[in-house]
Image (cartoon, grey):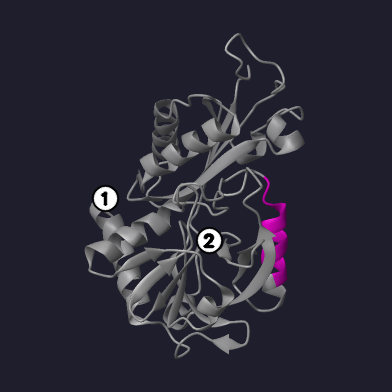
Amino acid sequence: MDIYLNGQFHAPEDARISVEDAGFQHAVGLFETFQAYAGRAFRLEVHLGRLADSARQLGLAAELNTAPLADAVAQTIAHNQIDRARLRLTLTAGTLSLLKTGSDGQPQARQTVAIVPQPPTRYDPDYFEKGVTVTVHGPAASPFDETAGHKTLNYWARLKALRHAATLGAAEAIWLNVTNHLASGCVSNVLLVKEGVLLTPFARGEEAEGALPAPVLPGVTRGVVLEVAEATGVEVRRKMLSIDDLLTADEVMLTNSGWGVLPVSAVEKQAVGTGGVGEVTRQLRSGWLSAIAEETGWDG
């Protein structure tokens, strides 16, 4: 499939950015990964809203107009005649220094925009029928890191932890923050079920007034799952969670736009609940799939 790069389409082997691009040189950039179903990007407006919010908070752009980005995604889907795909939109500061500012004090740079479509990742069906094992990593996430809770290009530490988890036969690593509370997975959000209540760590923007910033990405799939839970009568609580909460949970699940809702059956050597996939997890995964079908027309 062809790649959209700054208004033009290129074969993957022909797509080029400058070696002076701030994303390449200093990881100054943001990205969003989302899925297309039946030729429509699922929850695109939420992904782009999060991107614009991060661009503003981190100083990449004071006001990011997301309409041209949505149009570029539509062009990419149409150009490649996409029915089902994984797409990644990357936005960098471009080739001009962030130190050069205009009269408004904002960086003067022409951002680089790339949209890369790929076939969707195929996961082993057993992941969803039997659950996966996770490891614990940390403390690593810090509320004093102003980029935490944003999808920046700096994923080295997360990918390193994920690779280590894979060597141990695990599918994901649960990050702890610097106070040893649960943060998230390397590439996912984490949710627990205890006595029928759905628990999840605070994400960026959900903190109590006066609290330190939560170093947790407000995941789009996590948002869908919380909507489904509330609509179906499952009580939801956002709170600080400990490792003991994780180890004594009845159910644990991970969410991201790739796998959707992924059951966790073990935390390292300790089984979660009965060691299988819990009913609340199954219910929420079914609700997530229903939301995709309702919003895109996808029939699976």
Q: Amino acid at mark 2?
A: Ser
Query: Which residue sits at x=65%, y=54%?
Result: 142
Q: Which disc number belongs to residue 295?
A: 1
User: Which quadrant of the view contains residue 277?
Assistant: bottom left
Q: Amino acid at mark 1?
A: Glu
- In the picture, the quarter occupied by the C terminus is bottom left
Q: Position of residue 289 (x, y in %)?
A: 32, 63
Does 41 sit left or right of 156 as displayed? left
Q: Residues within 10 Å of mark 2 (few under 14, many from 20)?
A: many
Q: Which region of the structure is painted magenta? A: 154-164
Q: Residues within 10 Å of mark 1 (few under 14, many from 20)?
A: few
Q: Are marks 2 and 1 in contact (CB under 8 Å)?
A: no
User: Which quadrant of the view contains residue 70?
Assistant: top left
Let me know if residue 156 is in the magenta part: yes
Q: Answer yes or no: is residue 299 visible.
A: no
Name the main secondary structure of what is drawn in magenta.
Answer: helix
Q: Position of residue 36 (x, y in %)?
A: 39, 49
Let me know if residue 242 is in the magenta part: no
Q: Position of residue 22 (x, y in %)?
A: 71, 30
Query: Which residue sits at x=66%, y=65%?
Result: 162
Does 90 sit left or right of 278 as displayed? right
Of the residues under marks 2 and 1, which one precedes in the sequence?
A: 2
Instruction: Choose mark 2 or mark 1, whichever is in front.
Output: 2
Relative to 187, is 191 above or below? below
According to the image, label 2 marks what residue? 188
Q: Answer yes or no: is residue 248 visible.
A: yes
C-alpha separation, residue under disc 2 versus residue under disc 1: 22 Å
Identify the residue at the far top of this view. 103
Identify the residue at the far front of this view. 210
Q: Position of residue 58 (x, y in %)?
A: 59, 34
Relative to 175, is 87 above or below? above
